[in-house]
Amino acid sequence: MPLPSLRNIQLLPYSKLQQLLIDSNSSEYGSRYDLLSFATPEQLTAATAAREELLQWLTHRATIGYAGTKMDCNGLSPGCLHCGDGSWSCLFINGRCNGRCFYCPTVQNDDGPPVTNGLAFTTPEEYAAYVALLGFRGVSISGGEPLLTPDLTLAYLKAVRGRCGDDVHLWLYTNGTMLTPDLCNRLRDAGLNEIRFDLGAVRYNLKKLRLAVGYIPTITVEIPAVPEDEELLKLKMFEMAESGVNHLNLHQMRLTPHNFGPLMERGYTFLHGEKVTVLESELSALRIIRYSLEKEIPLPVNYCSFTYKRRFQHAAARRRAAMTICNSGEVVTEPGYLRTLSATGVSYCEAVLLQNPGYHHPFEKIVLETGRALYLERRPLTPELELTIIERRNLGMGHPTEQITRFEQVKYGLAEYF
């Protein structure tokens, strides 16, 4: 029997939700699931206490934002601010990379066209029109490795800058190995505002990063928090600050079918959840933030948890589509769902932007200025749920019933350890 969709479940008692997530993790990895070393009850207790101590320390010295899923929010890069407010589009310009990072979550052998949120854009003009129509204020170019296809990358950057002007913040992700002074010049001339380096791909060598300083206004290092590299990274943070790095972003490592082998070999402790994550990675990231503040290193450090990505980036995509299709009698909730109130109850649906309509649900056609058509599909998530007069009043005051909380509010805090 197929597992119930996590997107469509009602709020469950915590133990049942935990079991649903465990079953989902087991289903994803099949027979390999039994090879994973998940945290024992004793490890979970110790890790939860360690995290709580770190968060308590950070609460008084840092800014914890985005419903408790991102910290330190002092000094976030311009691109991170656009990500946080939901005004960001990430275009995967290619699907190939020249790096061999053990933590990479995806296969790097895709020769398809540039894509974002499942939408392919074969010309720079079409993508720029999409950015303009949806009102994005931040655009990033990712991959693969965008500098493996420099002319293609530059064409899309120029198209967005030409169509949308200076109001859009443009940034690019790279391992930096292909960067040259000439390419720095061309990226600057194309309007690039920020460049983000995955220094983990080059063992934290800053040589190529330094080429971009003075050309690109904002220099960011964005890497997963690799537990065994924690002490090395603490030393490198001083060098980053001295070299002109403006921001350091740390991601939580997660397990995927692609990186299963390399992560297994390193003996990490895994956690259940919407996706399997690495316990040591989160604790390492929090310790690094604490270290940077204790040592007063002039380099803002931000931990971008998997929980943040799952809740806020998904909510942003839903909200953009919902705002475009929202009718006069509907409300777009904080997590991006469409709420419809009736005389007796409430129902919810999700708006999804598609390349082609599925014909299973109602949809609307939108046309870009280039003539390209996209489709907004309205997918029902619940039947009409009955509300009492008091429950309706409380909903209007921002106090939804437990039954509908997940549709009304973004859950607070980092993921529970289990």
Image: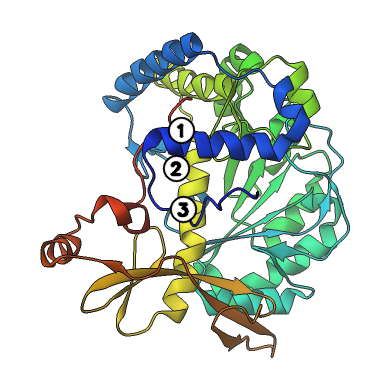
Give the numbered dot on residue 300.
1
Q: Amino acid at mark 2?
A: Leu
Residue 18 image position (x, y, % from top left): 47, 34
Q: Amino acid at mark 1?
A: Pro
Give the numbered dot on residue 47.
none
Q: Determine whether, in the image, residue 331 is placed left or right of residue 48.
A: left
Q: Nearer the viewer, mark 3 or mark 1?
A: 3
Q: Which residue appears farthest toward the front when viewing the image?
A: 1
Q: Determine whether, in the image, residue 148 is placed left or right of residue 360.
A: right
Residue 270 image position (x, y, % from top left): 61, 23
Q: Regarding mark 1 in the picture, which secondary structure is present there?
A: loop
Q: Is residue 203 visible?
A: no
User: Answer yes or no: do the residues labelled 3 and 2 have beta carbons within 8 Å?
Assistant: no
Q: CA distance from mark 2 to mark 1?
A: 7 Å
Which residue, given by chain and number where applicable, does mark 3 sit on?
Answer: 9
Which is nearer the N-term, disc 2 or disc 1? 2
Which is nearer the N-term, disc 3 or disc 1? 3
Q: Amino acid at mark 3?
A: Ile
Q: Regarding mark 2 in the picture, which secondary structure is present there?
A: loop
User: Answer yes or no: do the residues labelled 2 and 1 have beta carbons within 8 Å?
Assistant: yes
